[in-house]
Amino acid sequence: MHTETKRAAPHRWATLAVLCASLLMVGMDLTVLHVAVPTISRQLLPNGAELLWIVDGYALTVAAGLITCGTLGDRYGRKRLLMSGFAVFGLASAGAALSVSPLQLIIARAALGVGGAMIMASTPAILRATFDDARERTLAVGLWTAASSIGVSVGPLLGGLLMEHFWWGSVFLINLPFVALALIGATFLVPESKNPRPSRWDAGGAALSALGLALTVYALQQLSEGSRTQPLTWLLGVAGLGLLAAFVHRQRRIDSPLLDISLFADRTFSFAALSILGCFGAFTALLFLLTQRLQLVDDYSPLRTGLSLVPLAVSNAIGAALAPRFSAAFGRQWGLSGGLLLTALAFAGLGVFGPADNYAALVAAGLGAGTVMTLASDAILGAAPTERAGAAGAVQETSFSLGAGLGLAFLGTALSLAYRSSFAPVPQATEHQVETARQSLGGAAEAAEKAGGKTGGALLDSARQAFDTGFTAATAVAAALLVLLTLLAVLSAARPRKEASLSGGRSLAGDRTDNTRAAYDECCLR
C-alpha cells in the first residue's frame, strides 16, 4: 500500500479534482430537480406521495447504500466501484430524462441513488490512500467536502438555467458530460486500492437497513396523503422501525458490522452526527420548499428562482469557510450552538415573512447551515481514532445523505398534511377537480388550467393559500427541531466532558481533536 500511494503522489491533486467533480455531481443531483418539479407535476401528474418519492428517492437510496457499497469497495477495489458508480449514474440519468410516468421516474431516481452511493462510498477511501501527508490530507478533505456542499447549493440555479431553455429532462441529461469526463479522469488518474484483509460483507444487515428505511419513509409519506388504508400504513411504519432496531442490534453483536455502533458511545461523535442529520436535512428540504413556493405561489420563473437562491448558496460556502475561525474563537460546541440557532431563526423568518426578497433570512440560513455542517464533520473525524477513521467517515456521509432524505420526507409530509387540511372549499368546482387540486400545488395548477374561468382562478387561489399555510407549518417544524438541537449543543458545551474512551481510557474528542484542529488551522487559515 505504501508503494502504491507513493506512485500516485505526483497525480494526487489531479486525483482530488476527479473526486471533487464526482461529489459536485452527486450533490448537485440532490437539488437540481427542484425547479423542474412544477413542470413535472403538470406533465406526469404524480400525487403528493409520488412527488416526494421522485424528489426524495435519490437521497434515501444513497443513504441506504453507502455503508454496503463501502464494504464492497474494500473487498473488490475502490477505483472499480467508483467507475461502476459513474456508469450506473449515467445510465440512470438517461432513463430519468426519458421517463413518461411517475413510477418510471421514481425507479430511475432510485437507480441514480445506487450510482451515487457507489461514488460517495469509494471517494473517501481513495482520498485517504492518495494523500499520505496529514496536512495535505486535511486540506484535501476540506476541498472534497466543500465540493458536495457547492453542488447541493448551485443545483437549483443550474436547474433554472436548463428549464429556461430546455425541457425538464435536461436536468438529468446534464449529468452525462460530467460522467464521461469523470470516467476518463478516473481511468488515468485515480489509483486502485482495496483492503488486503476485507471484512465479511453483512448481507443480512444490508437488507435490514434498506428495507427498514424504505418501509419507514413509505409509511411517513403515505400518511401525508390521508389514505383510507391508514391502519396498514401505520403497521408498515412500525415494521420499518422494527427492522431498523433489528439492524442496530445485529451490528452490535456481529464481528464485522456494516456500521460500527460503538462509535456512538462518544457523546461528541453522536451529537455531531445528529447535528448533520438535522441541519443538513432541514437545509436540503428548504431548497425544495423554496423552489416550489417561489414558482407556484410567487410566480417566479425557473431561472429567477435559481437566481434568488444564489445568496443562500454563497452564504453557505462562506459559513463553511469561516467555521474553523468560529471554532478557534469560541470553541467548537459553542460554534455549533450559534450556527444551529442562526439557522433556526432563519427558518422562522422565512415562515413568517415569506422567502420572496427575504435575503436576510436566506443569508442567515446559509451561514448557519454551512457553519454547522463543517464543525460537525470535523467533530466526527476528530472524535474517532485513526484506525477507525474509515468507519467514522461512513457515518458522516450516511448522516448527510440520510438527513437529506429524511428531512425532505418529514418536512414534505408536514407541508402536505397542512396543505390538504387547509384547502378551502371551491363550491363551483367538481369533486374530481377539487380532489386533483388537493393532491399537490402542481396538480392544482393543472386542474385550474383545465377548468378555466372563475372556477380555475378559485381553485388556484385556494391552492396557493393552502400551500402558504403548509410552507409556514413546515418551516415552523424545522425551526423547532433546530432550537431543540441548539439547546442540546449548549448543554453539551457547558457540561464538563466525562465520556468514556473507546480505546484505552482517553476521550476520543481529547488530544486527537486538538491535533486535528491544529493541522486544519495550519493548512487552511494561513
Image (tube, grey):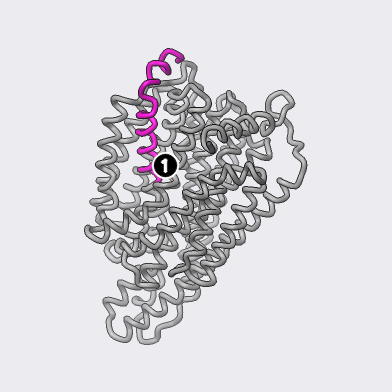
On the image, the x and y values in percent for residue 254 come to 59, 27
Q: Position of 448 compared to 400: left or right?
A: left
The residue closer to the viewer here, 240 or 128, is: 128
Lateral position of residue 45 relative to residue 255, left or right: left
Residue in view at x 38 percent, y 16 percent: 7
Q: Residue at x 43, y 24 (%)?
A: 130
On whether residue 460 falls in the magenta region, the answer is: no
**Magenta segment, prevailing SS (helix, strand or loop):** helix
Amino acid bearing label 1: Ala
The quarter in which the N terminus is drawn is top left
Question: Could you tell me if residue 397 is visible in this image?
Answer: yes
Residue lying at the far top in this picture: please name it. 3
Dot 1 crowding, Cα within 10 Å, few <14, some 14–19, many 20+? many
- Viewer-side residue, 92 vs 27: 27
Q: Nearer the viewer, residue 76 or 370?
A: 370
Picture quadrant of residue 122? top left
Residue drawn 43% across the image and 54% down it: 313
Q: Position of residue 56 (x, y in %)?
A: 42, 52
Residue under label 1, please give it: 147
Residue 465 vertical placement versus 105 (above, below): below
Write the start and end of the magenta stretch as one range: 1-27
Query: In the rendered view, would you say 475 is above or below 1?
Result: below
Above or below, 203 relative to 162? above
Image-based side of 495 in relation to 119, left or right: right
Please, which residue is most extreme toward the front here?
526
At numbered mark 1, what does the secondary structure look like: helix, strand or loop?
A: helix
- Can residue 216 be seen here? The reply is no
Q: Position of residue 200 (x, y in %)?
A: 50, 23
